[in-house]
Image: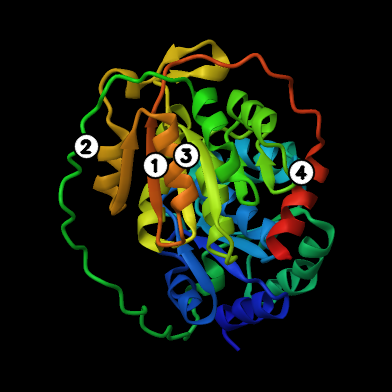
């Protein structure tokens, strides 16, 4: 059995259900073969994959990531404040660049630092330097899901070097098609984020809702506190990735309450939304042009960036723009699963004076998981 076949078999035996993946030329045959065996989501940046995997876990699906080790540096905060904080399981299969056979000098630094980063984060990992060492994946992967832990698997390029594995062809994909320009004008906002949430409260009831970090989650909790709300307590930029991961793995409507600062941090997620196109996903982007939780400092969306146009450029077809809370509420209430829909709500800066969220992350995760999996 080839190393690629053993790796795939180990993932199957552990019932891994969704992989967030980015390619590396050292493990390209494994990467290509993954599509024939698993649900794979091709991401554009590793951090968004952390959110996707968290959303999949909420929906009861066992996730994994397949990346190059250089991407670990893009994931550190999300791993700490999302995956660790909520105790989501996440095996990370990494192509370990920078070893003796490395021909690109710039790769050597992360090759050297990755084990140190994982040690510093207290993430257990395995160095897989031969095909036989894949046994460490086979033996420990089931425990990752049983114990809700993060675990790294560092595959040295030597593992694949002499493999005779021939991957099946990539599945057929549709060609990029031209979308008409988004013509909606940018009108001056007239209501706050809290006004939008209050107006949409009834429409949000009974839905799975991912609240953006900080003030948005506190305001969401104050207007419609329900077990199906996933309140983000950290990990800025992860609201829509989490919602996307959940939407791809359940049949229920999933709504992301996102913000302009958050979307600007991980805009590539919009490309992944367009690429995967889950019909049950609604992105309620409340764009107030400011970093509301840190003092209302202006974002690029307040001066130069039109996020609806950005979303259209990434390939999202259905976009609505409004400055009217009632109109936004009607759009949420009328959403019937023919998405993904990006609802671009232009708002005034400012936060409502509402209490902090006192729920612990374990309860938040448990309640939302129960809702999605019922």
Q: Seen in the image, is 198 located left or right of residue 328?
A: right
For the point 72% across and 51% down, the residue is 368
Q: CA distance from mark 4 to mark 1?
A: 25 Å
Q: Residue furthest bottom?
A: 1
For marks 4 and 3 on the same chain, the one whose residue lies earlier in the sequence? 3
- The residues tagged by marks 4 and 3 sit, at their Cα atoms, a distance apart of 25 Å
Labelled disc at residue 184? 2
Q: Quadrant of residue 339?
A: bottom left
Task: Tell me which residue sits at (66%, 61%) in the image.
Answer: 59
Q: Determine if residue 32 is in view.
A: yes
In the image, taking residue 140 as reference, residue 45 lies left or right, namely left
Disc 1 versus disc 3: nearer the observer: 3
Question: Circles 3 and 2: CB distance less than 8 Å?
Answer: no
Q: CB under 8 Å between callouts 1 and 2?
A: no
How far apart in space, not on screen, are marks 1 and 3 (Cα)?
10 Å
Q: Which comes sooner in the sequence, label 1 or label 2?
A: 2
Q: Nearer the viewer, mark 4 or mark 1?
A: 1
Where disc 3 sits, the SS reads helix
Q: Nearer the viewer, mark 3 or mark 2?
A: 3
From the image, tell me which residue sits under label 3: 329
**Alpha-carbon span between mark 3 and mark 2:** 18 Å
x, y percentage for residue 272? Answer: 40, 54
Please name the residue that numbered disc 1 is placed on: 343
Q: Earlier in the sequence, mark 3 or mark 2?
A: 2
Q: What secondary structure is found at the residue carrying circle 4? A: helix
Q: Can you identify the residue that label 4 sits on?
A: 364
Local SS, label 1:
strand
């Amino acid at each position: 059995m080839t190393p690629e076949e053993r790796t795939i078999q180990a993932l199957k035996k552990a019932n891994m259900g969704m992989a967030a993946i980015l390619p590396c030329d050292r493990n390209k045959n494994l990467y290509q073969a993954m599509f024939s065996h698993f649900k794979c989501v091709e991401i554009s940046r590793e951090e968004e994959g952390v959110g996707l995997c968290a959303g999949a876990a909420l929906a009861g699906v066992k996730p994994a990531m397949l990346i190059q080790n250089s991407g670990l540096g893009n994931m550190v905060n999300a791993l700490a404040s999302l995956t660790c904080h909520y105790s989501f399981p996440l095996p990370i299969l990494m192509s370990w660049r920078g070893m003796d056979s490395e021909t690109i000098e710039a790769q050597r630094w992360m090759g050297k630092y990755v084990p140190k980063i994982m040690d510093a984060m207290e993430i257990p990992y395995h160095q897989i330097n031969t095909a036989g060492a894949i046994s460490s994946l086979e033996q420990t992967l089931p425990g990752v899901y049983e114990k809700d832990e993060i675990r790294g698997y560092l595959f040295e390029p030597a593992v694949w070097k002499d493999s005779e594995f021939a991957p099946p062809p990539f599945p057929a994909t549709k060609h990029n098609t031209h979308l008409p320009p988004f013509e909606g004008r940018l009108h001056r906002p007239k209501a706050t984020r809290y006004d939008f949430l209050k107006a949409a409260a009834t429409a949000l009831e009974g839905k799975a809702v991912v609240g953006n970090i900080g003030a948005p989650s506190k305001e969401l909790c104050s207007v419609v506190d329900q077990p199906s709300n996933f309140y983000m307590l950290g990990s800025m930029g992860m609201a829509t990735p989490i919602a996307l991961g959940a939407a791809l793995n359940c049949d229920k409507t999933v709504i992301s309450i996102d913000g302009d600062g958050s979307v600007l941090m991980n805009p590539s997620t919009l490309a992944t939304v367009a690429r995967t196109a889950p019909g049950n996903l609604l992105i309620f982007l409340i764009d107030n042009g400011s970093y509301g939780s840190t003092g209302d400092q202006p974002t690029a969306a307040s001066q130069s960036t039109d996020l609806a146009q950005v979303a259209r450029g990434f390939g999202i077809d259905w976009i609505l723009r409004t400055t009217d809370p009632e109109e936004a509420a009607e759009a949420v209430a009328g959403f019937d699963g023919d998405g993904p829909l990006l609802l671009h709500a232009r708002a005034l800066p400012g936060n409502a004076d509402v209490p902090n969220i006192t729920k612990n992350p374990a309860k938040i995760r448990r309640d939302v998981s129960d809702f999605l999996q019922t």
